[in-house]
Image (tube, grey):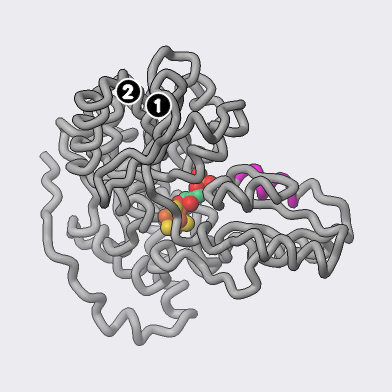
C-alpha cells in the first residue's frame, strides 16, 4: 500500500538552482520521455511559459478537474498549479494514482481565507442563532476539508466556469446559500442571476459576524468575506482611465474581480471565457484584461494582431502559481524516479469521501 510520507518542506538543493535553463529543460524532457504515459502534467493557464511548455494539457480549474477524473492511465500526475487543485485531482483520481505538487508552498491566498474551523463555527451560528436552512457552495479554491463539509450538507463545489449554472441550481432549492470563500464570485454571479444586493449578506470570519440589514425572509445568499489577492488589484479607476485613453477599448475581466469592476466592464467570465473572447476578437481590436498576468502576457504573445494589455498597468503574476518553476519541476521529477513521496498531495479517506460528493455533484450539474 502506498503511504505518502508527511515531511517538513525541504529547501530546494542548490544544484537545481545552479543549472542553466537549457540543462533544466533537457533534464525535464529526458524524464518525461523515460516515464511516457505513466506521467501526466496538467497545467493551469496561470503558470509561467517555462512550465507551460512541458504541459500535457493546459486548462482552467474546471477543465483540469474533468481531465484528471478521466485519466485512468497515468501513475504520476505532476500538477502545475496550486495546492487546492492538486487536492482536487487526488480526490477525483484512483488510489493508485499519485498527485505531485512541484512546490509544496504553492498555495492560494483566497483558499487560505477560510479554514474548516471558521466554517464550522459560521455554520453553527447561522443555523442556531439565525435558524437558517443552509445550502453551502464552495469555489474549488478551498481546502479539501471545506469541500467535505459542503458534500456532507448536500452542497456542491463550483468554479468560475460553471458558477452561473451551479448558483442557478442552488437558488432553486428552498434554502439560504452559504457561498465560500470568494465573496466577489458569489456576489457577481448571484447578481447576474437576478438576486439584488440587498438580499445578500456577508459573513466576516474574523469579526465572526453577519453583515446584513435586510429582512431574514429575503436573504438569499451569504457571501464569505474572502477574495483573490490577484483579482482584487483591478479597480474601477483602471477602467475609467482605459476608456479615457481609448473609447473603443473592450474591457474583459474575471468574475473574481470586485463587483464595481465587473459592472463597469464590457465582458466578464471565467478563464476559458477570456481565452475564447480573445481567440474570436477581430484583428486590430483593443482589449484591457483583468486577470492573472502570465495568462495576459501569453494571450498578447499568441495574438500579436490584437492589442492586449492588462487592465492594471502595474499588475504582477499570481505569486503562489509562480512558485512552480523549472528547478522545482526538475527536482520533483527526480523524486518520482527515486521513489520519494514528499511532494505527494494525499487527502485522507474520510475527508475525501464527502469532498468527492461535492465535486461529483458539480461535475454532474455542469
Ligand atoms: P479558473 O481557473 O476557474 O478560471 O480560476 C481562476 C483562478 O484564480 C484559479 O486559481
Ligand atoms: Fe488563488 Fe487568486 Fe492565485 Fe487563483 S489567482 S491561485 S485565486 S491567489
Q: Is residue 339 above or below residue 180?
A: below
Q: Secondary structure at mark 1?
A: strand
Q: Residue at label 1? A: 177
Q: CA distance from mark 1 to mark 2?
A: 6 Å
The residue shown at (17%, 42%) is 117
**Residue 134 has which mark?**
2
Q: Is residue 231 above or below residue 255?
A: below
Residue 274, position as x, y percentages in the image: 66, 48
Does the image show residue 113?
A: yes
The picture quadrant where one finds residue 235 is bottom right
Question: Does the CB distance between marks 1 and 2 fall below 8 Å?
Answer: yes
Q: Secondary structure at mark 2?
A: strand
Please report the bounds of the magenta region as a residue range.
272-278
Q: Earlier in the sequence, mark 1 or mark 2?
A: 2
The residue shown at (82%, 60%) is 286
Residue 96, position as x, y percentages in the image: 23, 37
Residue situated in front as seen by the camera: 131 or 143? 131
Amino acid at each position: 500500500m502506498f503511504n505518502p510520507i508527511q515531511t517538513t518542506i525541504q529547501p530546494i538543493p542548490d544544484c537545481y538552482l545552479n543549472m542553466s535553463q537549457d540543462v533544466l529543460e533537457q533534464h525535464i524532457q529526458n524524464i518525461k520521455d523515460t516515464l511516457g504515459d505513466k506521467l501526466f502534467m496538467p497545467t493551469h493557464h496561470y503558470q509561467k511559459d517555462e512550465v507551460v511548455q512541458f504541459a500535457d494539457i493546459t486548462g482552467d480549474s474546471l477543465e483540469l478537474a474533468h481531465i484528471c477524473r478521466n485519466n485512468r492511465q497515468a501513475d504520476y500526475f505532476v500538477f502545475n498549479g496550486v495546492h487546492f487543485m492538486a487536492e482536487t485531482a487526488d480526490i477525483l483520481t484512483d488510489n493508485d494514482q499519485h498527485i505531485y505538487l512541484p512546490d509544496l508552498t504553492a498555495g492560494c491566498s483566497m483558499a487560505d481565507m477560510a479554514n474548516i474551523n471558521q466554517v464550522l463555527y459560521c455554520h453553527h451560528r447561522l443555523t442556531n442563532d439565525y435558524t437558517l436552512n443552509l445550502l453551502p457552495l464552495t469555489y474549488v479554491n478551498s481546502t479539501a476539508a471545506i469541500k467535505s463539509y459542503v458534500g456532507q450538507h448536500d452542497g456542491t463545489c463550483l468554479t468560475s466556469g460553471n458558477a452561473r449554472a451551479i448558483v442557478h441550481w442552488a437558488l432553486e432549492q428552498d434554502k439560504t446559500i452559504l457561498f465560500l470563500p470568494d465573496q466577489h464570485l458569489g456576489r457577481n454571479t448571484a447578481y447576474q442571476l437576478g438576486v439584488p444586493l440587498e438580499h445578500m449578506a456577508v459573513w466576516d470570519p474574523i469579526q465572526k459576524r453577519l453583515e446584513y440589514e435586510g429582512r431574514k425572509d429575503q436573504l438569499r445568499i451569504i457571501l464569505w468575506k474572502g477574495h483573490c489577492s490577484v483579482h482584487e488589484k483591478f479597480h474601477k479607476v483602471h477602467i475609467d482611465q482605459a476608456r479615457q485613453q481609448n473609447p473603443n477599448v473592450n474591457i474583459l475581466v474575471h468574475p473574481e474581480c470586485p463587483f464595481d469592476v465587473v459592472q463597469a466592464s464590457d465582458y466578464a467570465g471565467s478563464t476559458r471565457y477570456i481565452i475564447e473572447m480573445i481567440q474570436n476578437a477581430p484583428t486590430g481590436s483593443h482589449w484591457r484584461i483583468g486577470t492573472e498576468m502570465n495568462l495576459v502576457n501569453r494571450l498578447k504573445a499568441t495574438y500579436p494582431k490584437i492589442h492586449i494589455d492588462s487592465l492594471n498597468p502595474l499588475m504582477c503574476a499570481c505569486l503562489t502559481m509562480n512558485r512552480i518553476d523549472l528547478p522545482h519541476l526538475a527536482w520533483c521529477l527526480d523524486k518520482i524516479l527515486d521513489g520519494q513521496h514528499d511532494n505527494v498531495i494525499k487527502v485522507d479517506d474520510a475527508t475525501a469521501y464527502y469532498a468527492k460528493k461535492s465535486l461529483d455533484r458539480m461535475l454532474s450539474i455542469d
